[in-house]
């Protein structure tokens, strides 16, 4: 007899029975997953749904918003407002966090999300995705403000992303492994397709936007220089490169077959601290990667231990196969030791 398929609902109920999530967190993940299904349908309609192109607005980061950025943000806000599982929300697309409106009951969790990461890829039909992170609302706080969200990544109780590609896949951790669920589009439900994803420790594949090379710091120049030198260089093996410019798609590849993803510090983004956002991108992805046996760092500090100083704080990112992240970090360590 073939194994019965395990839906996300069943998986979460079993996690609850095992004492790994409570009813409120289970509801929260189900609500986010439902919102992702709605976003997946909107993304899938493309030109036929009139959803492509610019919205004519900008976000807090000063980036032009796509129509789908705005739609995805609204879907997540609306879905999560009334369930009673959240105390507040924060989105990469909004200047400030938002407490749950007074008309609804407030729960004990805080939800942060990047509603549509990689949105510059929407119009060219390349994978995009939603990334989310869940924190506890601090004890005694009933109306959370921005500062209540400023908790290091080690405090996350759940994180995940949904990648809208040839398949719609939800990847989730509640702190006990990283698991992938594929959307059965006919049935409309997420089914468990990989329990306990594992990132190979070693890799021969790296992901970086190499057009920024001239702006990188010295340790990054040295690290990538040695990767490119291949078999004849100090690393003694040839490396392959991939760059999708959708973090969800690049990280999904790494969770599936290994590799290192990096968006390092460069002289263009240095005044801001990096390009990627700690709270909406780096922390949830780092939690997922660590739970799959990988590592995540800024190049100098374990990502999950970075103390956030603002909701939209940016950081340099290195994540993926453990040995390769450690290699990248060692170039930074040696450089900094030499400079000291
Ligand atoms: P957008 O959401 O503005 O497309 O940014 C995507 C992203 O934050 C991340 O998903 C990519 O890895 C990275 O930016 C791509 O940045 P570059 O365009 O500089 O390569």
Image (cartoon, rainbow, N blue to C red):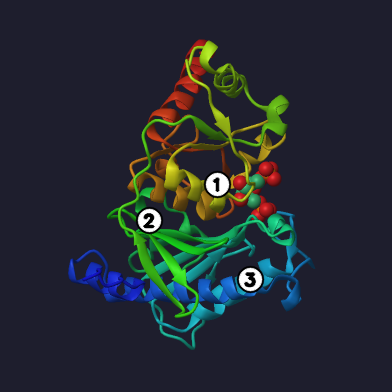
Reply above or below: 183 against 154.
below
In this view, which residue lies farthest toward the right?
56
In the picture of the structure, the residue carrying the numbered disc 1 is: 250
- Residue at 59 percent of width and 21 percent of height: 228
- Residue at 37 percent of width and 56 percent of height: 156
Q: Are marks 3 and 2 in contact (CB under 8 Å)?
A: no
User: Which quadrant of the figure contains the N terminus?
Assistant: bottom left
Q: Which mark is residue 44?
A: 3
Q: How many marks?
A: 3
Q: Nearer the viewer, residue 103 or 265?
A: 265
Q: State the CA–CA distance, disc 3 to disc 2.
A: 30 Å
Return the x and y of residue 84 as percentages of the image width and height. Answer: 40, 81
Q: Could you say whether the residue bearing mark 2 is in a helix, strand or loop? A: loop
Q: Are marks 1 and 3 in contact (CB under 8 Å)?
A: no
Can the viewer see residue 205? Answer: yes
In the picture of the structure, the residue carrying the numbered disc 2 is: 156
Return the x and y of residue 180 as percentages of the image width and height. Answer: 39, 59
Residue 76 in which image quadrant: bottom right
Q: Is mark 1 within 8 Å of ligand 1?
A: yes
- Residue at 39 percent of width and 30 percent of height: 202
Return the x and y of residue 17 as percentages of the image width and height. Answer: 18, 71
Of the residues tagged 3 and 2, which is closer to the observer? 3
Q: Earlier in the sequence, mark 3 or mark 2?
A: 3
How packed mark 1 is, by other alpha carbons closer than 10 Å (few <14, some 14-19, many 20 or more), is many
């Amino acid at each position: 007899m073939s194994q019965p398929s395990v839906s996300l609902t069943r998986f979460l109920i079993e996690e609850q029975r095992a004492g790994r999530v409570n009813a409120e967190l289970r509801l929260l993940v189900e609500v986010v997953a439902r919102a992702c299904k709605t976003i997946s349908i909107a993304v899938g309609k493309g030109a036929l749904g009139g959803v492509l192109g610019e919205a004519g607005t900008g976000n807090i980061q000063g980036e032009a918003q796509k129509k789908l950025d705005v739609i995805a943000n609204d879907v997540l806000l609306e879905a999560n407002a009334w369930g009673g599982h959240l105390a507040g929300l924060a989105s990469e697309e909004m200047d400030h966090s938002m407490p749950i409106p007074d008309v609804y009951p407030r729960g004990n969790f805080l939800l942060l999300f990047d509603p549509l990461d990689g949105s510059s890829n929407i119009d060219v039909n390349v994978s995009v995705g939603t990334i989310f992170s869940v924190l506890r609302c601090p004890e005694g706080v009933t109306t959370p403000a921005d500062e209540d969200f400023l908790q290091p990544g080690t405090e996350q109780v759940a994180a995940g992303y949904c990648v809208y590609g040839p398949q719609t896949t939800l990847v989730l951790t509640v702190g006990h492994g990283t698991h992938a669920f594929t959307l059965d589009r006919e049935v409309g439900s997420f089914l468990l397709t990989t329990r306990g994803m594992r990132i190979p420790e070693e890799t021969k594949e790296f992901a970086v936007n190499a057009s920024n090379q001239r702006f990188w710091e010295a340790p990054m120049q040295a690290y990538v220089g040695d990767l490119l030198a291949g078999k004849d260089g100090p690393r003694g093996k040839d490396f392959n490169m991939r760059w999708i410019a959708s973090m969800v798609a690049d990280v999904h590849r790494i969770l599936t077959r290994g590799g290192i993803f990096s968006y390092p510090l460069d002289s263009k983004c240095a005044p801001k601290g990096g390009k990627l956002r700690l709270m909406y991108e780096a922390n949830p992805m780092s939690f997922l990667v660590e739970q799959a046996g990988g590592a995540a760092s800024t190049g100098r500090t374990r990502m999950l231990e970075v103390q956030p100083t603002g909701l939209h704080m940016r950081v340099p990112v290195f994540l993926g196969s453990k040995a390769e992240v450690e290699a990248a970090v060692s170039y930074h360590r040696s450089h900094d030791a030499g400079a000291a």
